[in-house]
Image: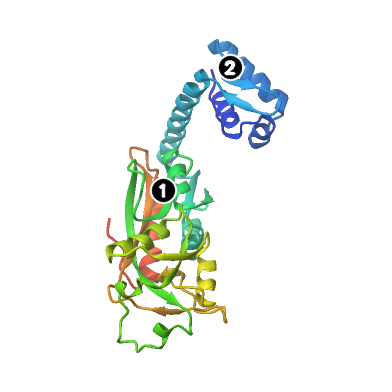
Amino acid sequence: MELRQLRYAVQIATDKNFSRAAEALHIAQPSLSQQLAKLEDEIGTLLFRRSTNSVELTHAGEVFIERAQKILDMADQLKQEMEDISQMKKGKLVVGSLPITGSHVLPLVLPVFRQRYPDIEVVLMEDTSANLEVLTHQGKADISLLSLPIQDSALQFVPLIKEEICLAVSQEHALAAQPEYAKTTITSLRDEPFIVLKKGQGFRQISLDLCAANGFTPNIVFESSNIETVQSLVAAGMGIAFVPQMVARTQWKPFVPAYLTLAEQPTRTLGIGYRKGRYLSKAAEAFIASLREVLLRTSDEPPFTS
């Protein structure tokens, strides 16, 4: 039994299709089928049920794939440790990122990291908070840029910085005309129409929790998977929204909301998540250090110390 055969079986289980799996593995489909047949012959049982249109795991296949994923993950961690011993001269780091937050942070940190570690390949995986937690738990992402709260208790979270959450309203909204010293309270927003991110986005839960902590459930009139769309809808007068200070717009007229400081001055905590017990490579540690350094230079809030 070879590691490559385990990778082949896991890829087939992921894609549920031989053609797609062969394409992802960059091998010919007949070769993939031959290797799987060889593996099944060696272990003495079928791993997949084949039909014209689908490939499904057998019971033995489910057990095999679960174990194979753990073995491959351990092999990858061993490889990382050996690369660290060789003084990080080469290697790969898979970084998960929230799309919009990442678009503000990664262009600042990646040039710094690349200059210091030119031979470390950085692979980016952009996804929702919920999916990033899954990918990080599975070891498909070494580390991920996330915000609290973290739903998966198997993930370790390294806080990096707190940033203020502001209230976005349209320029014509009555709240936009109030003097700056008259801070808006979250409780006073009880009857306002809210625009929030869709389920699976971490900042959606933050918004709901802010309302719940102030005694009400928001009246949600629109949902979007993109915080930029949320801000455009707010600017168009369709509702109000909580927005992280980092992604608040300063341009792109006429779709610029008014941003108000809330009396409670709520914040969100940004940081790096990785699976508990998983080896954190020197490359990952160096990336986190670079990220902390960049945030120190660019943010009004001091980063958390390690």
Relative side of 6 to 178, left or right? right
> Hey, what amino acid is under mark 1?
Ala
Q: In this view, does 88 lie above or below 98?
A: above
Q: Residues within 10 Å of mark 1 (few under 14, many from 20)?
A: many
- How far is mark 1 from mark 2, CA to CA? 34 Å
Disc ID at residue 39: 2
Give x and y (percent) for residue 211. 33, 65
Residue drawn at the location 40% of the way across and 71% of the way down: 245
From this viewpoint, is residue 107 visible? no
Q: Which residue is under mark 1?
A: 284
Q: Is residue 246 left or right of residue 302?
A: right
Locate residue 90 relative to residue 289 in the image: left or right. Answer: right
Q: Which labelled disc corresponds to residue 245?
A: none
- Residue drawn at 57 percent across, 81 percent down: 254
Quadrant of the rendered image containing residue 67: top left
Residue placed at 50% from the left, 71% from the top? 231
Between 190 and 112, which is closer to the camera in this rendering?
190
Mark 2: few/some/many CA within 10 Å (<14, 14-19, 20+): many
Question: Which quadrant would residue 218 be assigned to in this image?
Answer: bottom left
Which numbered disc, 1 or 2, marks the residue closer to the eye?
Answer: 2
Colouring style: rainbow
- Judged from the image, the secondary structure of the residue bearing numbered disc 2 is helix
Classify the position of the C terminus by image quarter: bottom left
Name which residue lies at 45% across and 83% down. 173
